[in-house]
Image (cartoon, grey):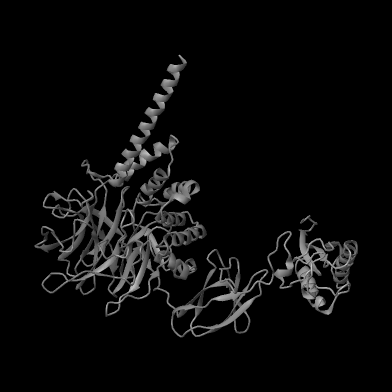
């Protein structure tokens, strides 16, 4: 019976092991096919059964991360980092940092962004954090410029997003996963929602939306359609669709169906059969089109080769914003990457307003978490201006995207998956109360380092004063020892750094006359010597030894100068106790030398006490000729200088607060 029981246990263990392996393989298969909801269920069951490996926890977190549920992603990434931080790939430091923002843990998020930079070697996303560590202040500065409301008349319990102006702004076209009537549409395995279709909604004079209706079946298919844009005359439409054309559903070499931009023309009230744009590809996505005000340029989002976010090391390529010229005959030039605004993060959902201002969403620029909406002006030459986060309440710790604005009325719409909506992504209306706040400002960035070693100094206090010595601002350096101040242009300031055990330092800085970045770093020098029990502080204080004349125990003048350093050290470290050790050379009888060294030790102690050092902090002991520094022992012929090396006193740290035996 015992042998049968053992055999049963072994067979059961083997079966359970095979079952777990099968479930992992099944979950990975769903994950690799982007069926994140199905993969998520499998991974959750595995974790519940106690099978939580690095792979399972990382991919479980990913199933939420790639479905924009960053709060749940943070929960599982936290477990991953708690147990397996030394095993994760660098990209997970970035994903964890992003998810931490979703739960308002910005300081912890910044720490993991620094770790991301350290583990990856260099990445522009963490470099931007280093250069703009006060990004939250900048976001607050831009916040409060909008009034928003949920467009509840058209939102459903499913995803509703990506609005576009249509028919002279009297209508909006948007993407929705809603199901109407008794017709059930096919669902996408990524998020288990029906495939998106384009709907129209009427807009009243206040921008309130209503009366949602599906667009033509010539446009909508059984797969995704989303994010349209229309020419000013309303007769040409560009929109996003799955790689599905003429009834053929195509995939890339890994089996993934990508996104493409299609174009359709309106004639006699009907839309023509959509045609693909020539720079589409089966191997990468091209999506989310928008037009320049004159209709001569098409901006879009893509992860095509050449993207800054294109990284073969990672499982998912991140998209960039691109632009392409629309030629007079309707053909297209070569797409160009907007390198001035793109990051290794995700840039997507571009929109160009009538004033030639670009709005887009990004996870790479500094934001509140998830996708934030940013803006950048486009010059007549096509160059991009400074990228600015447009602030709250448009941006939150959730995904905020699909921003469009009518510059004439200062009204518009955007999409967000923030709580409080009808469900999933919702469309929101807004009224812009004031323009982007602009002022001439200079970002002064730098770091604090040790003057001798060059090491970064954490917890140093930076205090900023005006030239009348009025305090303006204050910061404390973190792990990377950096600081950032946002200052007015063409002004002078005093920047002072202080830290315990260091000498303070300050510098007068004068900011330039135009906005920009200014670098200035400060060095400080330690004024306390790090010591430990049983250290000989003589070498630390650059004291070789306290020497005595032959057969004497009085303190020589040169010894007095050295002892002043000992006195200063003990005053600087009032908790330290010192043992004074005195020695002689080998000349004279051993017993005599024992007595002489004891007198020298006591003479040194008495001198320090006479200078104000508490007697309880000092002990003294003579060692005679027992601890020679050279070979000049009894009977060995040595010069006077060689014997001199042995006539000395040493100063040993024998405890902090109480004496310790250092022999």
Work out which residue is located at the far left of the displayed protein and give it. 268
Which image quarter is the C terminus in? bottom right
Residue nearest the observer in this picture, 126 or 259:
126
| In the image, residue 181 above or below residue 411 | above
Residue nearest the observer in this picture, 209 or 657:
657
| In the image, residue 443 above or below residue 267 | below
- Relative side of 564 to 84, left or right: right
Residue 485 visible in the picture: yes
Please name the residue shown 23% across and 50% down the image: 254
- Relative side of 427 to 631, left or right: left
Residue nearest the observer in this picture, 407 or 648:
648
Q: Position of residue 322 (x, y in %)?
A: 26, 67
The image quadrant that residue 413 belongs to is: bottom left
| Number of numbered callouts drawn | 0
Q: Position of residue 374 (x, y in %)?
A: 37, 67
Work out which residue is located at the far top of the displayed protein and give it. 1
- Relative side of 575 to 439, left or right: right
The image quadrant that residue 314 belongs to is: bottom left
Please name the residue shown 59% across and 74% down the image: 451
Q: Position of residue 439 (x, y in %)?
A: 45, 79
Residue nearest the observer in this picture, 5 or 426:
5
Residue 407 visible in the picture: no
Which image quarter is the N terminus in? top left
Please name the residue shown 31% across and 52% down the image: 155
């Amino acid at each position: 019976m015992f042998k049968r029981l053992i055999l049963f246990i072994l067979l059961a263990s083997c079966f359970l092991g095979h079952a777990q392996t099968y479930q992992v393989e099944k979950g990975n298969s769903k994950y690799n096919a982007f069926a994140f909801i199905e993969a998520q269920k499998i991974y959750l069951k595995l974790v519940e059964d106690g099978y939580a490996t690095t792979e399972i926890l990382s991919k479980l977190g990913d199933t939420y991360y790639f479905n924009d549920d960053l709060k749940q992603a943070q929960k599982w990434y936290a477990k991953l980092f708690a147990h397996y931080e030394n095993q994760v790939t660098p990209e997970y430091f970035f994903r964890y940092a992003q998810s931490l923002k979703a739960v308002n843990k910005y300081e912890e998020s910044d720490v993991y962004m620094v770790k991301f930079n350290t583990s990856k070697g260099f990445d522009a996303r963490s470099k931007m954090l280093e250069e703009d560590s006060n990004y939250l202040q900048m976001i607050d500065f831009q916040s409060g410029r909008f009034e928003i409301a949920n467009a509840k008349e058209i939102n459903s319990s499913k995803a509703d997003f990506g609005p576009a102006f249509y028919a002279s702004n009297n209508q909006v076209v948007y993407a929705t996963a809603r199901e109407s009537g008794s017709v059930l549409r096919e669902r996408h395995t990524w998020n288990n929602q029906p495939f998106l279709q384009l709907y129209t909604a009427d807009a009243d004079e206040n921008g309130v939306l209503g009366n949602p209706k599906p667009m033509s079946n010539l446009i909508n298919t059984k797969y995704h359609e989303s994010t349209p844009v229309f020419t000013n005359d309303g007769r040409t439409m560009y929109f996003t669709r799955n790689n599905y054309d003429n009834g053929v559903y195509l995939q890339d070499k890994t089996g993934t169906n990508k996104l493409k931009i299609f174009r359709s023309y309106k004639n006699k009230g009907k839309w023509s059969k959509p045609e693909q744009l020539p720079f589409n590809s089966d191997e990468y996505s091209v999506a989310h089109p928008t037009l320049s005000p004159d209709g001569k340029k098409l901006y879009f989002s893509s992860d095509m080769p050449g993207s800054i976010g294109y990284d073969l090391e990672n499982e998912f390529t991140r998209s960039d914003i691109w632009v392409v010229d629309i030629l007079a005959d309707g053909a297209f030039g070569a797409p160009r990457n907007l390198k001035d605004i793109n990051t290794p993060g995700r840039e997507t959902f571009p929109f160009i307003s009538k004033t030639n201002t670009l709005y887009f969403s990004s996870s790479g620029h500094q934001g509140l978490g998830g996708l934030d909406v940013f803006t950048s002006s486009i010059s007549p030459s096509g160059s991009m201006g400074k990228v600015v986060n447009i602030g709250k309440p448009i941006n939150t710790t959730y995904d905020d995207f699909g921003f469009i604005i009518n510059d004439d009325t200062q009204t518009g719409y955007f999409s967000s998956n923030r709580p409080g909506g009808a469900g999933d992504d919702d469309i929101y209306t807004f009224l812009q109360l004031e323009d982007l706040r602009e002022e001439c400002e200079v970002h002064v960035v730098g770091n604090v380092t040790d003057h001798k070693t060059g090491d970064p100094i954490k917890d140093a206090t930076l205090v900023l004063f005006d030239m009348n010595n009025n305090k303006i601002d204050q910061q404390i350096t973190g792990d990377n020892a950096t600081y950032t101040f946002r200052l007015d242009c063409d002004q002078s300031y005093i920047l002072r750094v202080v830290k315990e055990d260091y000498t303070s330092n300050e510098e007068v800085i004068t900011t330039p006359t135009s906005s920009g970045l200014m670098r200035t770093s400060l060095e400080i020098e330690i004024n306390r010597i790090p010591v430990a029990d049983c250290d000989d502080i003589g070498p630390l204080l650059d004291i070789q030894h306290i020497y005595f004349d032959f057969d004497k125990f009085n303190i020589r003048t040169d010894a007095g100068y050295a002892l002043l350093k000992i006195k200063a050290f003990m005053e600087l470290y009032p908790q330290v106790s010192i043992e004074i050790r005195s020695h002689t050379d080998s000349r004279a009888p051993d017993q005599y030398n024992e007595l002489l060294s004891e007198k020298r030790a006591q003479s040194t102690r008495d001198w320090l006490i006479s200078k104000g050092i508490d007697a309880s902090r000092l002990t003294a002991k003579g060692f005679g000729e027992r601890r020679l520094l050279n070979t000049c022992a009894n009977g060995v012929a040595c010069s006077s200088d060689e014997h001199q090396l042995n006539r000395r006193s040493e100063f040993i740290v024998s405890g902090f607060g109480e004496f310790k035996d250092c022999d």
